[in-house]
Amino acid sequence: MQVESLDQVNIATPDVAATARWYADVLGLDSRAPNASVPPERALWLLDAAGRAIIHLQKLSDRAGPTGPVHHVALRCRGHTEVIARLQQLGMEHQSAFVEQLGRYYVVLRDPHGVVLELNFDER
């Protein structure tokens, strides 16, 4: 497995719109809803200059957890089969799924502090 880049950070906030405005004002990031079925008061994705959703904002009540406002960190990776084998060898709890609409495998686990680590693989 190889980590290629940071994919996105997910931040839980009590006020999605105000937090999105702050990131727009400070960093110039544009925002959009993740999809048509999610209202913007529940979630927004903040986009970099290339249109990549690098910060995901979610309503705090939707993602409240032990790690404060940082719910999860997502990494873009290669080598899905290898990481599954490694996690199984280490006996680490994880979840894995393929999302057909995105053509992406997701592997989700927690670090020793409880932060969710999302490994994304754009592989078939």
Image (cartoon, rainbow, N blue to C red):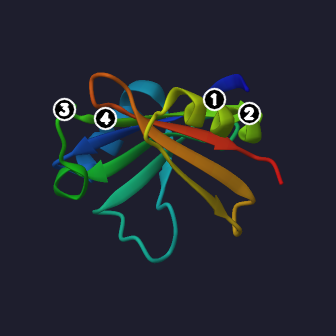
Provide residue 66's location: percent of width, then percent of height. Answer: 17, 35
SS under mark 2: helix
The image quarter in which residue 82 lies: top right
Residue at mark 1 to residue at mark 4: CA–CA distance: 40 Å
Q: Can you name the residue that lies furthest to the bottom here?
A: 37
Q: Of the residues under marks 3 and 2, which one precedes in the sequence?
A: 3
The image quarter in which residue 97 lies: bottom right
Q: Of the residues under marks 3 and 4, which one precedes in the sequence?
A: 4
Query: Label 4 crowding class (10 Å Cα cut-off): few <14, some 14-19, many 20+?
Result: few
Q: Is residue 122 left or right of residue 34?
A: right
Q: Of the residues under marks 4 and 2, which one precedes in the sequence?
A: 4
Label 1 belongs to which residue? 86
Residue at mark 3 to residue at mark 1: CA–CA distance: 29 Å
Nearer to us: label 3 or label 4: 3
Q: Mark 3 near mark 1, Cβ–Cβ under 8 Å?
A: no
Nearer to us: label 3 or label 2: 2
SS under mark 4: helix
Nearer to us: label 1 or label 4: 1
Name which residue type carries label 3.
Gly
Provide residue 71's location: percent of width, then percent of height. Answer: 31, 39
Q: Is residue 9 left or right of residue 60?
A: right
Label 2 belongs to which residue? 82
Residue at mark 3 to residue at mark 4: CA–CA distance: 19 Å
Front-most of residues 39 and 6: 6
Residue at mark 3 to residue at mark 2: CA–CA distance: 31 Å
Residue at 47% from the left image edge and 61% from the top image edge: 33
Residue at 19% from the left image edge and 42% from the top image edge: 65
Q: Mark 1 near mark 2, Cβ–Cβ under 8 Å?
A: yes
Nearer to us: label 4 or label 2: 2
Label 3 belongs to which residue? 68
Label 4 belongs to which residue? 22
